[in-house]
Every structure is written in structure tokens, then in C-alpha cells.
Image: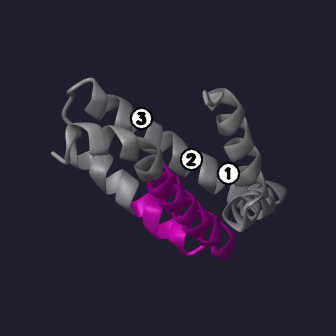
């Protein structure tokens, strides 16, 4: 019996949207966005993250100044309870996605063997 993988994928999407991990993430994100000061801090943090990731992907070196700037922003951001809760919720969501990815990739791992 053939299975429509896309139907299963859409069912998984729905399950993710209904999961406690996603709902906690969404609530934390909404809480940060409702606080202008927290939103501004979080947006600044995200922009620094994106810039550093882009540099890494392009093989560019990250300067000591950029590292110090990122570390100081992270220190400030982590002191904000709303942002800290959002970051924890993101981490839990990323762990869940990683675990789901392992489950999804299991047939290929079984076929080719573990590397």
C-alpha cells in the first residue's frame, strides 16, 4: 500500500502547531512582541545573529569587535525574562525538530547504515 508522504507531512505540521512546545514558543514570542523594549532588544540580537551566520556561510572571518558586540548584546538580552523564556522555548522547539528529523531520516539510516 502506497502512502502519500505529503499528507503525512501536513499532518505532522498540524501536530507541531498543536504541540506544547510550539504553543509555548508562540506565547513567548507574542509576549516579547507586545513589549516594545524587549522587541527592540530581541530584534537587535537576531540581526547580529543573522549577520554573523551570513559571514560564516560566506567563509568570512568574524572580527574580535563583532564577537565582543555579540557577547554584550547576548548578556543584556539574557537578563530580560521575556526574551530569556523565548530563547528557552526556541531551544526546546529546536530539540524537538531535531528528534523528528532523526525519526524522518531513520529509513535512510537503516538503508545505508550509520555513518
Residue designated by label 2: 44
* Between marks 1 and 3 in the image, the one whose residue lies nearer the viewer: 3
State which quarter of the image contains the N terminus: top right
> Can you tell which quarter of the image residue 105 is in?
top left
Q: Which residues are magenta?
A: 72-100
Secondary structure of residue under mark 1: helix
Q: Residue 76 versus residue 29: which sits nearer the camera?
A: 29
The residue that appears at 65% across and 36% down in the rendered structure is 9
**Residue 11: image x %, image y %?**
73, 42
Mark 2 or mark 3: name the one nearer the start of the chain: 2
Q: CA distance from mark 1 to mark 3?
A: 17 Å
Q: CA distance from mark 1 to mark 2?
A: 6 Å
The residue that appears at 76% across and 62% down in the rendered structure is 23
Secondary structure of residue under mark 3: helix
Question: Dot 1: few (<14), some (14–19), or many (≥20) neighbours within 10 Å?
Answer: few
> Can you tell which quarter of the image residue 19 is in?
bottom right
Q: CA distance from mark 2 to mark 3?
A: 11 Å
Question: Tag on residue 51?
Answer: 3
Instruction: Reply above or below: 37 against 107.
Output: below
Residue 85 magenta-drawn?
yes
Instruction: Reply above or below: 29 against 12.
Output: below
**Residue 111: image x %, image y %?**
27, 38
Question: Dot 2: few (<14), some (14–19), or many (≥20) neighbours within 10 Å?
Answer: some
The residue that appears at 79% across and 57% down in the rendered structure is 18
Q: Residue 8 versus residue 68: which sits nearer the camera?
A: 8
Residue designated by label 1: 40
User: Going by the image, does 82 lie left or right of 87?
Assistant: right
**Residue 57: image x %, image y %?**
29, 29
Amino acid at each position: 500500500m502506497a502512502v502519500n508522504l505529503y499528507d503525512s507531512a501536513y499532518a505532522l505540521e498540524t501536530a507541531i502547531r498543536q504541540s506544547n512546545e510550539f504553543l509555548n514558543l508562540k506565547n513567548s514570542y507574542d509576549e516579547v512582541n507586545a513589549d516594545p523594549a524587549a522587541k527592540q532588544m530581541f530584534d537587535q540580537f537576531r540581526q547580529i545573529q543573522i549577520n554573523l551566520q551570513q559571514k560564516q556561510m560566506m567563509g568570512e572571518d568574524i572580527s574580535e569587535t563583532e564577537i565582543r558586540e555579540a557577547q554584550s548584546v547576548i548578556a543584556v538580552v539574557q537578563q530580560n525574562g521575556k526574551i530569556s523564556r523565548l530563547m528557552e522555548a526556541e531551544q526546546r522547539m529546536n530539540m524537538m525538530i531535531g528528534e523528528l528529523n532523526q525519526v524522518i531520516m531513520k529509513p535512510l539510516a537503516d538503508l545505508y547504515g550509520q555513518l
